[in-house]
Image: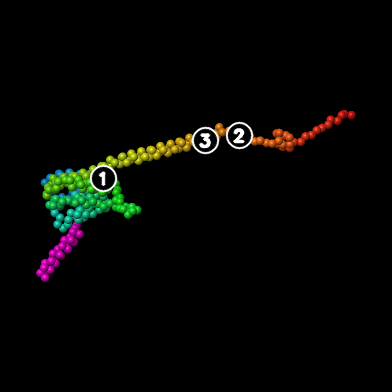
Amino acid sequence: MMFLALALPLAAQEIDKTDKIEEVAAPPAPEGRILDDARLFTLEPHVLDALSNSLTGLSDRTGYEVYVAIFDSLIASNLKEQSRVLQEAWIGEKPGVVLVLESDSSEYELGWSRTPDAVTESGQKVPVLGESDLAPQEQVRILNELSGLPEVEEGSMRSAETLIHTFTSGIDQAFKEVDEAEPDRWNVRVLMLGTGLMAGMLLIGLLVGAWIRRSDRKVTERLVFPEVTVGMRLGAPCGGGKISSRSFDVLPHE
């Protein structure tokens, strides 16, 4: 009975903790796109301003919403849940991502916006990407770049600065590659269109030439009746119709 009495309050605390994780509220979206709840940049605000300007310029240029949130420690939530909550509150249905850093644990999580999927005839789901979306392979590449960094030092402003800079640079590079590839795709389309037009003009020229040659043959063409052998008719070798003869006697004058 004593164990049960102690277990019930603990179970109630776990239930309350779960409820708090589910009901965690999101703070308002920061104007500079970086929420420094851990106050890492308090002594050097110019560094925070430079990073904020970088994020703002990136989002304005690409249409991809980018935010960063830094906390000392997450008590009523966890990194994955906090990134999801902030992504839904700050970005919503628009394309974008939120980087959530927990300074005390030196861990971070990315909350990506989900893109709609198209289902093929075979039942396979394929993401539908807009002009301001990042392809899944680009997201994986950014994650790999962040994983290659040294571990974020606890409470270190420089480590957080390196993490944010690498994060934004990866997104910026992904969109630059798309912009650089667009003229190449346009050139290929123009080349294919030009080739098609040349082939069409060549075909028309061949048809016109064939029509002209056929017309010339008709102008110089001579029609000849075939020779036909006709038998003798009533002794007349060339008579083809009726032949009659008349004879007259001249009478002498009285």
Nearer the observer, disc 2 or disc 1? 2
Residue at mark 2 to residue at mark 1: CA–CA distance: 80 Å
- Range of the magenta residues? 1-26
From the image, give the main secondary structure of the stretch colored magenta. helix
Nearer the observer, disc 2 or disc 3? 2
Q: Out of 176 and 206, give the one closest to the viewer.
A: 206
Residue at mark 2 to residue at mark 3: CA–CA distance: 19 Å
Residue furthest right as drawn: 254
SS class, disc 1: helix
- Looking at the rendered structure, the kind of residue marked 2 is Val
Q: Nearer the N terminus, badge 3 or badge 1? A: 1
- Looking at the rendered structure, the kind of residue marked 3 is Arg
- Neighbor class of circle 3 (other Cα within 10 Å; few <14, some 14-19, many 20+) is few
Q: Position of residue 145 (x, y in %)?
A: 20, 45
Q: Position of residue 220 (x, y in %)?
A: 55, 32
| Membership of 88 in magenta stretch | no
State left or right for residue 86 relative to residue 119.
left
Residue at mark 3 to residue at mark 1: CA–CA distance: 61 Å
> Which mark, by number, is residue 214?
3
Vertical position of residue 13 compared to residue 108: above or below? below
> Which mark, by number, is residue 62?
1
* Residue at x 32% of width, y 54% of height: 123
Vertical position of residue 183 compared to residue 114: above or below? above
> Which mark, by number, is residue 224?
2
Figure quadrant of the C terminus: top right
* Residue at x 26% of width, y 49% of height: 136
SS class, disc 2: loop
Q: Position of residue 224 (x, y in %)?
A: 60, 34
> Which mark, by number, is residue 132?
none
